[in-house]
Amino acid sequence: MIKFIQKLLPPPKWRIPLIFLSGIILGLGAFLFYVSKAHTYLSDDPATCMNCHIMAPQYSTWLHSSHRERAVCNDCHVPHNNFLNHYYFKARDGMRHATIFTLRAEPQVIFIKEAGQKVVQQNCIRCHGDLLNSGNTKMYTSQYDDFREERHCWECHREVPHGRVNSLNSVPNARVPKPGTAVPGWLHKMMNKNK
């Protein structure tokens, strides 16, 4: 085993340059982690979705909806069937969003993808399942049983919770958390001190 590990080590003359190179790579990785606020994505804070300012219409419409009192973004848009699937879906969706935003390829109007639709539908049922089986609900419409398993909830509840118009131009003056500066505090102080 020790011989195998020794075979993996670089030759002695390469060790110091490799230590410096590893330090640079780790430092850049830590800086990117800080600048992208990657640690905030582990939380359920809706303001995290505002790290990309293109989510302003979604944040603003949620903030003015009744769902604000009961649910945050992750309650509806991330699976809750198990711990691993929860964070796998969150990481996969987050990487897709980060890639699109970094490449400046975001659309003017955001539409939910098919995988996201399935998750939202499951979460609608997770929270409102009692209503689906309630006899009182059946009194309101005779077609209730015909459509409840074949249609998405938002085909009828179109305004919940983001409304119908969600383009960046639709809410130009929305009051949403602004993305903070990417400049670290110590560097910001140093820059202001030199002015």
Image (cartoon, grey):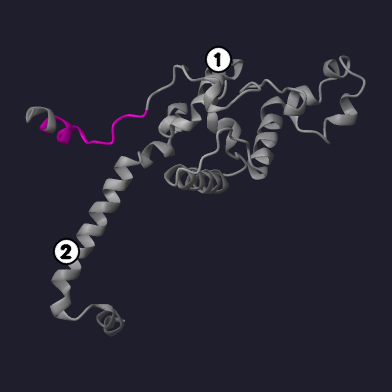
* Local secondary structure at mark 1: loop
- CA gap between label 2 and label 1 equals 51 Å
Residue 53 or residue 185, whichever sits in front: 53
Looking at the picture, does residue 76 appear above or below residue 24? above
Q: Amino acid at mark 2?
A: Phe
Image coordinates for residue 158, horizontal then vertical, percent: 71, 23
- Residue under the point 54% across and 33% down: 74
Verify whether residue 177 appears in magenta.
Answer: no
126 left or right, relative to 53: right
Q: Quadrant of the N terminus?
A: bottom left
Residue 135 or residue 186, whichever sits in front: 186
Verify whether residue 187 appears in magenta.
Answer: yes
38 left or right, relative to 156: left
Marker count (numbered): 2
User: What number is the disc on residue 20?
Assistant: 2
135 left or right, relative to 128: right
- Residue under the point 38% across and 25% down: 178
**Residue at which label 1 appears:** 64
Callout 2–callout 1 Cβ contact below 8 Å: no
Q: Amino acid at mark 1?
A: His
Residue 128 or residue 74, whichever sits in front: 74
Looking at the picture, does residue 8 appear above or below residue 43? below
Q: Quadrant of the C terminus?
A: top left
